Image: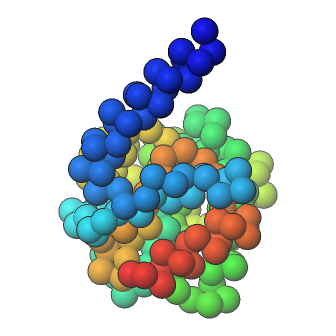
Amino acid sequence: MNKRWGSLLILAGLALLPIALQSGIASLKTMVSGNAILQVRKQPRVIASLEFMDRNGMPVRLSDFNGRHVLLNVWATWCRPCRKEMPALDRLKPIFEREPHITVVALSVDVAGFEQLQAFYDTYDLKNLALYRGNEQTVMGILAVGGLPTTLLLDHQGQEVGRLIGPTEWDAPDVIASLNAIHGQH
């Protein structure tokens, strides 16, 4: 019985391979030392104009970050995996600020106001990430996000070059090395 299930799983994986390749994913390798890593696109994907708000209610455009690579994490306070990964994402931000080549942006799609988001940041002792909030339908539609958390790596022109659906330990050495490697290629 176990051999049969194993064979079926292998066949299912092989059947899905062409779909994955057609979606523009260059690498199907998703784990390094147990940590999920970004899947790299064969061709960068153009991202439509996206606007969201900073903690002061001022509009911010994704294009405001052009000229730098952006690790854009889409999350919400109600998302359990998001809550788990936010402290690691917060620790990652100053690591990349020492060598300013990747900007870390955490974009909440909560309906909650900035007071509630700040309370979340206080609860999880998040001190490095700026507070940004966007409309859930707009953000998820423009970025083609189907679930949370989803993280995109954007190149210096604002095009998507990598994506991870689900959480990871962002400040783990293997994840940082994979981000640096992807950054070096784009």
Residue positioned 67% across, 44% down in the render: 83
Question: Quick check: can you spot residue 60?
Answer: no
Seen as rendered, the residue at the extreme top is: 1
Residue positioned 60% across, 47% down in the render: 167
94 or 185: nearer the eye?
185
Seen as rendered, the residue at the extreme bottom is: 99
Residue positioned 36% across, 68% down in the render: 161
Looking at the rendered image, the quarter that the N terminus falls into is top right
71 or 127: nearer the eye?
71
Residue 116, x across and y down, in percent? 61, 45
Residue 34, x across and y down, in percent? 70, 50
Q: Is residue 49 above or below residue 146?
A: below
Q: Is residue 145 above or below residue 160?
A: above
Q: Is residue 46 left or right of residue 101?
A: left
Looking at the rendered image, the quarter that the C terminus falls into is bottom left
62 or 89: nearer the eye?
89
Residue positioned 58% across, 37% down in the render: 79
Residue 45, x across and y down, in percent? 25, 64
Seen as rendered, the residue at the extreme front is: 3
- Residue 24 falls in image quadrant: bottom left
Question: Quick check: can you spot residue 161?
Answer: yes
Q: Is residue 76 above or below residue 29?
A: above
